[in-house]
Every structure is written in C-alpha cells, then in structure tokens.
Image (cartoon, rainbow, N blue to C red):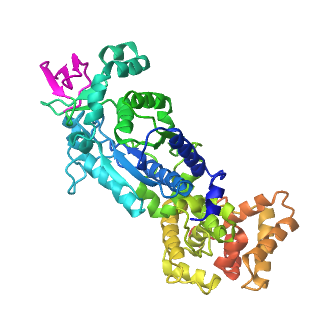
C-alpha cells in the first residue's frame, strides 16, 4: 500500500475515512492493549434479512477497509452478530402459516420451529442462513456469531457474573429511562423458564452476586433460582448491547437512528462492566414506497432477492454508500438510477487521479480495487429498448446492441449481458404495467413529423450526441419555450413514459430509421403499447 494513498486517506472527506480516522484516534487514546480491532454488526432474526441488514455489513466493511489503509499491519475482524436468543414477541407477517407459531410466542427465536421448510432446526437458524447466504455471495469477510451459542457456550459468563455483581449500578442507569409501571417490575436479567422455555419479563426477587444466581417466580407462580451463566438467563436488549461490547471488546459498531437515543445507555453499561465503549456511527433509516420505516417482520420495502432480480449487488452497494445519514426511500423505483450511477462512477475511475479515485464510491465498494468493465449502454437506455422493440428476448435485444456497438457480444461484454437480463425483468414487472401512451397535440405533431423526416435523411451511423443536437434543433424550430416539454412529449407519445435517457442515444441504439418509423406509427394513431 503506497504512502501517497495513506496521505490522501488522512484528509479524504469520504465518510468511511472520516469514521476510520475517529476510530484510530479513539484507539490511540485508549489505554487498552489489543491484538486486533473488532468491528461488529447486529442482526435481529425476527424476520427474513432485508436490504438494511446488508447495508449495515457493507458500510461497516467500507469503514474497516478505510481503517486498514490508515493503520496498515493492524489486524481487523468483522463479527456479524445475530440476536437469536431474543423472545419472539409477535409472529411475522412473512411466515407461511402464522397460526402454527402461536404456541411458541416468547420463546427464544432459536427455539421456535422453522416454518419455512428445509433442513434448518429453528426459525432463527433459517433466517441466519439466509443472511449468511447473501453475505457469502457478496464475498464479505466476516465471522458469524449466534447469541444463543455464545450464551450457552459461556462466552458471556464472565460479564454476566459481573452484571450480577453490579446489578444496582445497572439499575441506576436503566430505571430513569422507564415509566413508573415498568420500573416496578423491570430487571436487566431475563430468565428462560425451565418449564415453558419462554423468555420471562419478570421482576427479580433476589440477585445473588456471590453465587451468580437470580431468583424469580416462574409462570405458574413457583419460585425458581437459576444461574445467570450457561444460557439460563439473557439480558434485556439495552443492557445486552453494552454487555456484548464489553465481553467481546468491540471497537466499532454502526446502527440505525432508532438506536441513537439509547446509545448513551449502551455505552454506560459497557463501561460499568469494565470496558471502554466502542466508536459509533448512526445511519438514517430506510423508508418504503409510502415513507414508512422498512421492517423485517412486516416485509415492506425490498428484500435482498428482489434487488438481485433487477440489478447487481454493486448498484445496491452504491445505494448504501451514498449519504448514509440521509433518510432514503428504498423501493424498486430507485434501482435504475443506482445502476447507471454505479456504471458512471466505474467508467470515470481509470481517468481520475489517486485523490479523486479515493473519493469515488467504487473505490469503497470494491475495497480499493474496482474492476475494469466496459458497458457502452446505460440501463435506462436498455429499458427503453425493451419497450420500443416489443421484445423480451435477449437475442433480439442483442441484435440492436450489435448494430449500435458492432464489437459488443454477450461473450466479451458479460456485464452488459447481465444488464440485458435485468432490464427485461425490470421492464416486465414495473415499466410495462405503468406505461401510459398519449396522442400528440398539434404543435407536438408538427415537430414530430419534422423530426421523422430529418431522421430519414441522416447517416444511420451518426453518433447519439449528434442525433441529440438534431432533436434539440427541431424543438427550437417549433418554438418549445422549455425544451424539456419537447423531450417529455417524445417519451410520452413514443414510449409511454414521461422521462428517459438522452433521446439521441435512444435513436442511435434503436436505429434512426426504426425511430422515424415509430414516430410515424404514433402519428398515424397506432396502439404504441403493441407497436
């Protein structure tokens, strides 16, 4: 790794470097000697993993790589932690047979039967596997951790015993954050009923720090004493956050804005249990098409598999990189824009100086080593081609592509070939059902007649930029005060959409003669949804 890169990283305004510098400063001030720097992400397997979960791992990976640039030679590790010992408080909307899980409410997610079928022995095991499957597909460098396994294996025993010894101190942190009714019954310890297997939210009758036990009344009223170790007891989620940080020595964790008000509580619990709190990064939440927070249990927003049906993981990673502290709609209509922006950033990268490359999102998406990819056609343009060609056959679309770019083929342009498939899927599911064609008004008709005539006269191999100039000129000649109205008319009349890529590029790809013929068919009143 070059010294020039490290120097640039010291002042880069790219947010992963800003966070990495904060982490480095925190570690330098800390008096704790460590062999490695540990990054963590959390996952609650109460529902299938959604894109927000992927985003947390992707963003943390970006910070981790930025840190490795700033601190070469320092060992780092990423732990993806699943809170699968949490009780199932409600049955997710996304399960096949919700009634079958009714009797398992309040049991740890790792003890709830798997409703999805397959070889997984619990609800949590299935959801954990779905998470790992995707993270593996994206080649994340991570270590998966299960709360159930850690609790039962005694990985938290030392800090649980310490929590029993510092019980009063923890209660002093927690009680002021609760209402009067909750204060009367609250305990940071949640015992697992030895009779029902459920996670119990009950007050502690006694906490014995010396013996490391808690005493409480079970669901049937019988007084029970359990050791806090060995997975017999777990912590409420807020104390659990801080305990886990202390037990594992976490150095960095990011979380959503819904955790922001609780961060001081997590920190204080961690400190009570004898460890410095980690560096935080708070990101804004993702919203669905109605502006509501996406939720694993509701299944709103986009699933991981949804995005991958229509676009690459790299375009998804770009979405995660861009403005993480701004709330963003995470819905299907954001996909085309992110695909094309990713391709634009990737295309610019080889021509940039090092300082600009480091600030280019693709540097962070690909951990400093973006691939060389030649994609001569935008995703938006491919979507228009699918609509205009009236074909969802890749071979037909490649016929247009080869006429536009003779050297291109599925074999030597595999990334473009993937985009063709994605464009077909996206067009079929989202563009086609929403298209609304209209007839031109008199002014638009005259301009389109003029444009069709000019397209018939030009060289069929004229570049898209020059065709665009012709389209501009026609709009000006026909006195469109706002040329956007002229281009909007072309797209609404010819393609059933109100916007699209540069029309000149579309005409070059679709063919100037075919474009002229399409204009004439529209002016003749043909049904353009079938033309």
The answer to whether residue 131 of the structure is visible from this angle is: no
In the image, residue 299 lies at what x, y percent?
40, 46
Confirm whether the magenta stretch covers residue 167.
no
Which residue corresponds to the image point at 72% horizontal and 60% vertical from the top-left? Answer: 488
Which residue corresponds to the image point at 63% horizontal and 64% vertical from the top-left? Answer: 345
Q: Quadrant of the N terminus?
A: bottom right
In the image, residue 254 lies at what x, y percent?
48, 43
Residue 173 sits above or below residue 503 on the image: above
Residue 110 sits above or below residue 418 on the image: above
Which residue corresponds to the image point at 45% horizontal and 31% vertical from the top-left? Answer: 267
Q: Quadrant of residue 269?
A: top left
Total numbered labels placed on residues in the image: 0
In the image, residue 456 lies at what x, y percent?
76, 83
Confirm whether the magenta stretch covers residue 217.
yes
Q: Nearer the viewer, residue 199 or 160?
A: 160
In the image, taking residue 113 as reference, residue 340 lies left or right, namely right
Residue 331 sits above or below residue 469 on the image: above
Which residue corresponds to the image point at 25% horizontal and 21% vertical from the top-left? Answer: 202
Q: Quadrant of residue 509?
A: bottom right
In the image, residue 238 lies at what x, y percent?
38, 30
Q: Which residues are magenta?
A: 198-227
In the image, taking residue 385 as reference, residue 300 lies left or right, namely left
In the image, taking residue 256 as reference, residue 136 lies left or right, namely left
Q: Quadrant of the C terminus?
A: bottom right
């Amino acid at each position: 790794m070059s010294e020039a890169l490290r120097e640039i990283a010291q002042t880069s305004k790219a947010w992963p470097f800003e966070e990495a510098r904060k982490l480095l400063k925190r570690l330098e001030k800390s008096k704790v000697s460590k062999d490695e720097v540990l990054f963590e992400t959390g996952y609650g397997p109460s529902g299938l993993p959604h894109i927000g979960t992927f985003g947390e791992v992707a963003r943390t990976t970006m910070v981790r790589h930025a840190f490795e640039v700033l601190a070469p030679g320092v060992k780092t590790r990423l732990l993806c932690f699943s809170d699968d010992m949490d009780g199932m408080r409600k049955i997710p909307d996304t399960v096949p047979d919700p009634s079958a899980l009714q009797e398992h409410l309040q049991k740890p997610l790792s003890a709830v039967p798997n409703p999805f079928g397959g070889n997984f022995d619990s609800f949590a095991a299935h959801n954990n596997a779905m998470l790992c499957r995707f993270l593996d597909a994206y080649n994340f460098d991570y270590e998966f951790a299960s709360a159930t396994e850690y609790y039962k294996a005694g990985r938290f025993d030392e800090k649980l015993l310490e929590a029993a010894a510092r019980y009063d101190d923890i209660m002093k942190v927690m009680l002021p954050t609760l209402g009067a009714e909750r204060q009367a019954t609250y305990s940071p310890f949640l015992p697992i009923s030895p009779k029902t297997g459920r996670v119990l939210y009950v007050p502690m009758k006694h906490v014995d720090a010396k013996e490391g036990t808690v005493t409480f009344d079970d669901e049937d009223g019988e007084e029970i004493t359990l050791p806090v170790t060995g997975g017999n007891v777990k912590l409420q989620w807020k104390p659990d956050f801080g305990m886990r940080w202390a037990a594992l020595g976490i150095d960095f964790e990011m979380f959503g804005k819904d955790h922001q008000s609780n961060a001081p509580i997590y920190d204080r619990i961690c400190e009570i249990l004898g460890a410095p709190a980690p560096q935080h990064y708070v990101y804004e939440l993702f919203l669905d098409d109605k502006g509501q927070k996406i939720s694993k249990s509701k299944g709103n927003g986009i699933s991981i598999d949804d995005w991958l049906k229509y676009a690459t993981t790299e375009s998804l990673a770009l979405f995660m990189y861009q403005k993480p502290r701004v709330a963003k709609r995470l819905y299907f209509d954001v996909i085309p824009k992110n695909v094309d922006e990713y391709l634009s950033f990737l295309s610019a990268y080889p021509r940039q100086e090092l300082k600009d490359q480091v600030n280019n999102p693709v540097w962070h998406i690909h951990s400093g080593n973006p691939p060389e990819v030649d994609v001569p056609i935008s995703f938006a343009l491919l979507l228009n081609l699918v609509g205009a060609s009236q074909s969802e056959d890749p071979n037909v679309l490649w016929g247009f592509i080869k006429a536009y770019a003779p050297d291109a083929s599925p074999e030597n342009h595999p990334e473009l070939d993937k985009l063709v498939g994605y464009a077909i899927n996206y067009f079929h599911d989202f563009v086609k059902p929403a298209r609304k064609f209209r007839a031109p008004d008199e002014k638009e008709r005259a301009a389109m007649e003029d444009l069709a005539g000019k397209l018939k006269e030009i060289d069929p191999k004229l570049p898209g930029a020059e065709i665009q100039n012709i389209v501009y000129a026609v709009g000006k000649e026909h006195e469109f005060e706002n040329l956007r109205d002229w281009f909007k008319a072309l797209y609404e009349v010819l393609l059933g959409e109100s916007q699209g890529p540069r029309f000149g590029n579309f005409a070059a790809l679709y063919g100037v003669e075919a474009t002229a013929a399409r204009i004439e068919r529209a002016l003749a009143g043909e049904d353009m949804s079938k033309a």
